[in-house]
Image (spheres, rainbow, N blue to C red):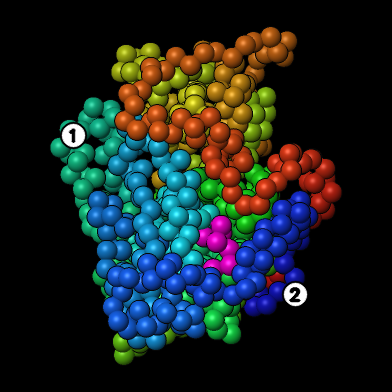
Amino acid sequence: MSPHPASIHPAIEAVTERIRRRSANLRGAYLQGIDSAWRDGPHRGRLGCGNLAHGFAACGPTDKQRLRGDATPNLGIVTAYNDMLSAHQPFEHYPQLIRDTARALGATAQVAGGVPAMCDGVTQGRPGMELSLFSRDVIAQATAVSLSHDMFDAALYLGVCDKIVPGLLIGALAFGPLPAVFVPAGPMTPGIPNKQKAEVRERYAAGQATREELLESESASYHSAGTCTFYGTANSNQVLLEAMGLQLPGTSFVNPEQPLREALTRASAERALRITALGEDYRPVGHLVDERAIVNAIAALMATGGSTNHTIHWVAVARAAGLVLTWDDIDQISRTVPLLARVYPNGDADVNRFAAAGGTAFVFRELLDAGLMHDLPTIVPGGMRAFCDEPRLHDGKLDYAPGIAHSADPDVVRPVAQPFEAQGGLRLLRGNLGRSLIKISAVKPEHRSIEAPAVVVDDPRALNKLHAAGALPQDFVAVVRYQGPRANGMPELHSLAPLLGLLQNQGRRVALVTDGRLSGASGKFPAAIHLTPEASSGGPIGKLREGDLIRLDAEAGVLEALVDAGEWAQRGIASNTAPAPFDLGRNLFAFNRRMVAPADQGALSISCGPPSPEGDWEYDAEYELGHDADAAKAPHETTDA
């Protein structure tokens, strides 16, 4: 296979060009705005004396002297540290490492601010989950507040998990003239196998395991500092950031407390200092994140079977950069990029084993060689090809070596010529119920289609009660509605996974259809999620009645109610029967629920990116797909690309 293909794959280029074309006005306005904001140079040099004195009042003499002028770079640190979350606890000591590194290089660094970081693993099935999605937008706003003091020449973003990274990135793009380097904390070391953990959960759901046994299993899985080891949203975040070139190559899956982890953190600070406007290698984040970077992120997501949550988050991230990414784009990329990794829930391996098998360096090289990923400018010299190398420590100094040429574990990572599947992990579903997405990489082919009666509930807990009462049909499609962003903040419904997985194990055919989300850790059974329009906006899911026959075909991309068209047209939207929740902070987000955009528009409850004309999100998808029909139908190359 040629290491440097003559051209990008035609289907990938077609999607990239569609995004570029439809985003031309928005992107132009965004770039004009950030360029004009930086036209007069770094902002600290324009602060009044009182402003500047406030900004360095708490610093020591050396830092004060350096900050008095405008020729010494100052790094802003935006941190998601808290010591309740395993993924973010390691960040406690990062600011001191970064300050020490900056001072040794004649520069300065300050903690600009903190952002909230909540854990969906803690709030699953609890009232707090209704705040989860909106926390992303709060994090974006908190990032903007942190950077609002005009004291910084570049920023380091310390965050890992589900909503935190997208929120930090949206906030960073609002300060597009500033260079941005993302700094992860790494995954915890392996605990008990994820498959074993899932089996205990299913036995508990069946009443065959005690709470003590379940807690022991969960504690053996989530056992130390670091990111959870399954390939959910948090670890997908890290792969996407590397695919966009926004964090140092190979930083995603180095465990906390390793010497290499500290070396990478120091190197991240050093790199941020080198790419400010005060030097000769200025790399503002607003210019690095273009349509090619967005396509790279989605291609990496599909190749690795990553989290469905990013079909919402990266639509929002793109919009923050003046780009319009759609579910049709994501679907086309998924139909073009093969599945190269099997990591739980798409397989038995955890992310530590994925990294040992070749990890991001191997996957990126395969995608680049096949023309399935753009080579583009990143925060480091060498473009995306630099991300095909792996970090090493030699005599205590950070160095890079080429990634392995062949998979060290073909059960976990494979080359483009021998993928696990010819297409990626997600599929867009269409039909008379609207548009939704399904993660098929974790679902066995024999479970990817179903035609069964609907069991309709507005409260996820009702499904478990029906099961306990023996009232569920042998085969059924669980319809859980009024779970969209406008209804209740679009909580994840991972708490349903043990029950539905258990029933599928018993030979029953089951599926889930919802306008809510499903955890990035979920899989196994077919789940049509993010259904839009949602029930609270008058979406057709609200028309469904108990016993309606539903057809879900993931391979064909179809989700529909098999109801007479005349009757369907006459039906009204059923009212929400779920009990009103106790507040617990929910009322503070009433405005977000009123203003939030649909899931396929990023579920944004804030304005981000440049102002757009009415109809910004309306475009003729059929025309676009037809216009690029030849490229969209181009066969995937499995030999030389």
**Residue at point 33%, 43% (across, down):** 121
* Secondary structure found at label 1: helix
Q: How many marks overall?
A: 2
Q: Residues within 10 Å of mark 1 (few under 14, many from 20)?
A: few
Above or below residue 132? Residue 551 is: above
Horizontal and vertical percent for residue 576? 48, 16
Amino acid type, callout 1? Arg
**Residue at point 66%, 67% (across, down):** 35
Horizontal and vertical percent for residue 184? 39, 64
Horizontal and vertical percent for residue 550? 59, 22
Above or below residue 396? Residue 223 is: above
Where is the C terminus found, in terms of image quarters? bottom right
Q: Which mark is residue 211?
A: 1
* Secondary structure found at label 2: loop
Amino acid type, callout 2? Ala
Residue with the mark numbered 2: 6
- The magenta region covers 172-178
Say which quarter of the image contains residue 327: top right
